[in-house]
Image (spheres, rainbow, N blue to C red):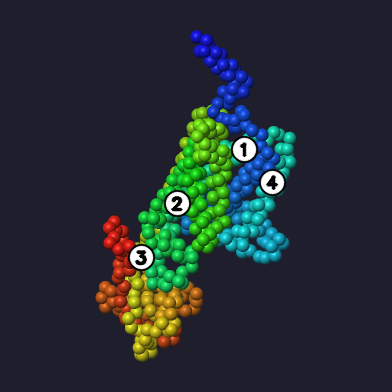
Amino acid sequence: MKVPTVRALLRTLSSSSPSNRAARRTGPRVGKALDSPQWSAVTQVASRFGVVYSGLYCLTTPQILLSVIGGGLGHRQKAADAWAKVWAIRPVRQWVAARVFDTTVGDHFDGGDNRYAWVGQFCWLTAAAAATGLWSALDRHRPRTGDVTSDARFRLLVRMCLAGQMFHYGAAKVVPLQFQLPLAKLVEPFGNFSPMTALWSQTGASKPYQVLLGCAEIAGGLLLLLPRTTTPGALLCALELTQVFILNMTYDVPVKLHSLHLLLLSLVLLAPETARLVEFSLSRREVRPAVSSELFRTRRANRIAAAAQVAAGLWMLGAQLRNDRRFWTAFGPGRAKPELYGIWNVDAYECDGRDRPALTTDGRRWRRLVVESVDVVTVQHMDDSFDLHAATIDMAGRSITLLKMTDPQWKATLALVRVGDDRLTLEGDVDGHHVRLRLSRLDLDSLPLVGRGFNWVQESSSLR
């Protein structure tokens, strides 16, 4: 009987201690463990800087605003212009660019890594450093215990912003909209591709792969919606964003700054769990329970808050899927394809009544006509140069009108005669010369990239 009596006495003493009575009064909210170690000054300052800088980035980045309001890829510039007006940051960036870097910046952020973005990051780094110094000076007499990155309100901001970005980019892949393989790329020499075009084309060539990438990003965002699943969600996001950042760096994609910051946001969420993750991975000891930090003092209030976070996250995801789907149908590959859709080889080219031979040194003779949509046509010349045209195809009136994107004064109207499903002739004036063309449509399935498909059994291991 002695052992149970001693254990009962210990439980009684433990439950009657002041610290545990306070814990019961506050309910499930625990800001930090009772035996929290003393933090070094450097670690505390670094933690505060991470909070300030992450908060500034979340609140001043137009892509994040775009995801929070549920906008898709087609609304990026509107979000950038609106957020710039809210924060009145254009004059600040322009002043810093002129006085500090002796350069000029544009009037808006284009979503990439232009000077406007780089100067802005310098501004926020400076502001975060100043705010961190002021915070540390005002708080210098308090004990350095606990990690400010574990504060529930701060983590809520970062979780929702990062989840919105994962939904934003994930939805654009699931639709799919972000990566495309235009018809003109099928006949353009691979050596003419920029590194980014090569990445976009190889990803756009496989829709299942693109959709799976989007599903993984959406899964990471969904796990971030609840505090309980934040750690696995942040781990998944960190893995995905590491791959994205590496691709952006190695293929020269102009989203290096933003992808790096999204990766840093996921690492900020993981920061309070670093010790536990290392202990779980490298030791055989039992991992201690996570120290929770709740928004409110009562269990009911926290459950309502969790439900609200899930509802807000699902609304963001649904809104972005709808917007991207609408954009995909109205302007993307989901729109109705024209009757002349395809790649048309120019079999014969007459200029002013004389046949023009197909010489690769002839930069004026047409080699192919690529009809991508009802209003976009690309002309490939014999020297493999390309001209992108706005087009009006009138099948009833049997004509096609071309306007050069690079020269608003240029215009050509050609009479169109359909000889068969895959043959036609064009005749009219182009660049002051009367031309007549005979064209035949290329069978897209004859191209291995399009027509090969998937095969479980392959007798040959060649690249073809």
Residue named by callout 4: 131
Identify the residue position indicated by label 1 in the image: 147
Q: CA distance from mark 4 to mark 3?
A: 57 Å
Q: Kindly report the distance in space between the C-alpha atoms of the residues bearing marks 2 and 1.
A: 31 Å
**Quadrant placement of the C terminus:** bottom left
SS category of the residue bearing label 2: helix
Judge the density around disc 4: few (<14), some (14-19), many (≥20) Cα neighbours within 10 Å. some
- Check disc 1: other Cα within 10 Å, few if <14, some if 14-19, many if 20+: some
Q: Where on the picture, by quarter, is residue 297?
A: top right
Residue identified by numbered label 3: 463
**Disc 3 + disc 2, Cβ < 8 Å:** no
Q: Could you tell me how far apart the alpha carbons at marks 3 and 2 are, in whole angstroms?
A: 30 Å
In this rendering, the label closer to the viewer, 4 or 1: 1
Callout 3 secondary element: loop
Alpha-carbon span between mark 1 and mark 3: 53 Å
Amino acid on which disc 3 is placed: Leu
Instruction: Report if residue 330 is visible in the image.
Output: no
Front one among 205 and 9? 9
Image point (60%, 50%), residue name: 57
The amino acid beneath tag 4 is: Ala
Residue at 49% from the left image edge and 36% from the top image edge: 228
Instruction: Name the image quarter holding residue 114.
Output: bottom right
Q: Is residue 206 above or below residue 406?
A: above
The residue where tag 2 is placed is: 170
Does label 4 or label 1 sit earlier along the sequence?
4
Residue 406 in percent (x, y) is at 50, 74
Q: Comparing marks 1 and 3, which lies closer to the viewer? A: 3
Residue positioned 69% across, 62% down in the render:
101
Local crowd at mark 2 within 10 Å, few (<14), some, or many (≥20)? many
Q: Are marks 4 and 1 in contact (CB under 8 Å)?
A: no
